[in-house]
Amino acid sequence: MTPSLSRTRATAALLAIGASLLPAVAWAHGVTAGDKGYIMETFGIRIVPFIYLGAKHMVTGYDHLLFLFGVIFYLYRLKDIGVYVTLFALGHSITLIAGVLAGVSINVYLIDAIIGASVAYKALDNLGVLAKWFGREPDPRAATIVFGLCHGLGLATKMLDFELAKDGLLPNLLAFNIGVEIGQFLALSVILIAISYWRRSTTFVRYAKAANVVLLLSGVALVVYQLNGYLSPSQG
Amino acid sequence: MSQSSGLLGALPSTRTLARASLAAIGLAALLTVGVVLPAEAGRDPIGLGAVLGLTEMGRIKVSLAMEAAADAAMDAAGGTGETRNAAAPANAQANRWRDSMTVTLQPNQGIELKLAMRKAEKAFYEWKTDGAEVYHNTHGEPPNPPKGFAAHSYAKGTAKTDTGDLVAVYDGMHGWFWRNRSAKAVRVTLKTGGEYLVLKEMK
């Protein structure tokens, strides 16, 4: 009982640590370090590096992971999981590719606040609160596509921040998108295994509600944190 | 994943879960050593990073991090040192070149030439390499930028030559950073004219 719960806790802790290791872009005298520096200093088609960067962004992006966690919380059939993950992937592929090609960049804080809101939404949905508020449950498939579109805008903004060269843009972009799917698959596998262990124990039933309340609070915290960043004067 | 073995709606068996866990741990170990280590640290113990082309990314990122750290240390130690100043002719005339400097970049080397300018002064420039493309970032900084200050970027990209005007957005050093990502040494020649104090190589 307790071991499987603590395993989930450990997974969550690991995810949090992984997120905090996200290399910050270091500026000094025009030297840009990190992934952005690498991209700015290289050129041409680089398929594998961009696949890697896409996967890295997804695996280290705790907000995307929290959303996926919420989406598959009550799904245990592979078929259902496949459907939702495909819908989500479809949504964010559209806005990622279209957003970068059209140069649509949304303020990072705002888009991250929306992604936080998607986490809160999914938690409310899992708690059955939305059904109570609206009389019936909103179509979860439509919601997954809509939030997929939002997450894709976040990815596009990230890509635009890399200031990609025109040379080889489309192949690199497609590679990044493939990387996002690979990263999503890897992250989902871990989440799914952890949830599956947990589902087998009676604590799942007992704490499912609590888990979604925590998810809700995380989503709200993300929204507040990002909006605070958006409104603080230091951001340009 | 191996959830499919269960009946419709049934939870995966212990065996399935154990197998999936083992596979995940194995894959995670392989990815850590074969992909993440090369791409982040430039180390490639099993050679997969070189096959995938990710070791280069790690090496570039490590060298950039060291450069950024060196710059930060230089700032802490009291600003930038100047190594050589270009000889500036006394009478600067509009639309005439005032200075010219040629630098040689070894593979992977980065060099910065900057104009000391007062706010709103307008200089013009032209630079070209002796053949290969170089990465360039044309940017400017105030004299004592606060920690974490983002330099103002005028232009950047990869090219063999570039020409244009530079209007200083604030008092400070404005100019060019080049890096040679080719396997051979590249010579870059810069000519400058217009309004500025002095052209110098930054170290």
Image (cartoon, coloured by chain):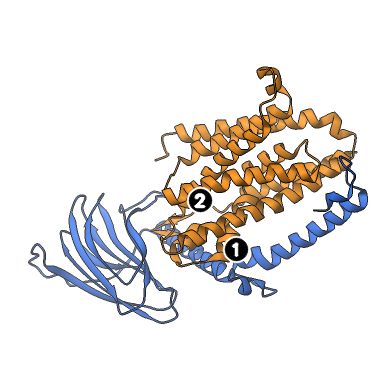
Query: What colour do you see for chain B?
Result: blue
Please give the name of the residue rendered at 46% of the width and 55% of the height, measured from the top-left corner. Answer: A162
Would residue A56 be found to the left or right of residue B108 on screen?
A: right
Amino acid carrying label 2: it is Ile
Residue A16 can be seen in this image = no
Image quarter where the C terminus of chain B lies is bottom left
Residue A188 can be seen in this image = yes
For disc 1, the neighbor class at 10 Å (few under 14, some 14 to 19, many from 20) is: many
Judged from this view, the residue extending furthest toward the bottom is B184
Amino acid carrying label 1: it is Glu
Disc 2: which residue: A97
Chain in orange on the image: A
Asked if both marks, 2 and 1, belong to the same chain, the answer given is: no
Chain letter, disc 2 residue:
A
Between residue B197 and residue A218, name the one nearer to us: A218
Would residue A37 be found to the left or right of residue B202 on screen?
A: right
Label 2 residue SS: helix
- How far apart are labels 2 and 1 at the CA level? 26 Å
Please give the name of the residue rendered at 87% of the width and 56% of the height, measured from the top-left corner. Answer: B19
Chain letter, disc 1 residue:
B
Between residue A112 and residue A25, name the one nearer to us: A112
Between residue A74 and residue A16, name the one nearer to us: A74
Residue B47 in the image, given as x and y percentages of width and height: 67, 75
For disc 2, the neighbor class at 10 Å (few under 14, some 14 to 19, many from 20) is: many
Q: Are marks 2 and 1 in contact (CB under 8 Å)?
A: no
Disc 1: which residue: B40
Would residue B1 be found to the left or right of residue B91 on screen?
A: right
As displayed, is residue A150 above or below residue B44?
A: above
Please give the name of the residue rendered at 55% of the width and 65% of the height, measured from the top-left corner. Answer: A47
Residue A184 in the image, given as x and y percentages of width and height: 67, 50
As displayed, is residue A168 above or below residue A163?
A: below
As displayed, is residue B86 above or below residue A92?
A: below
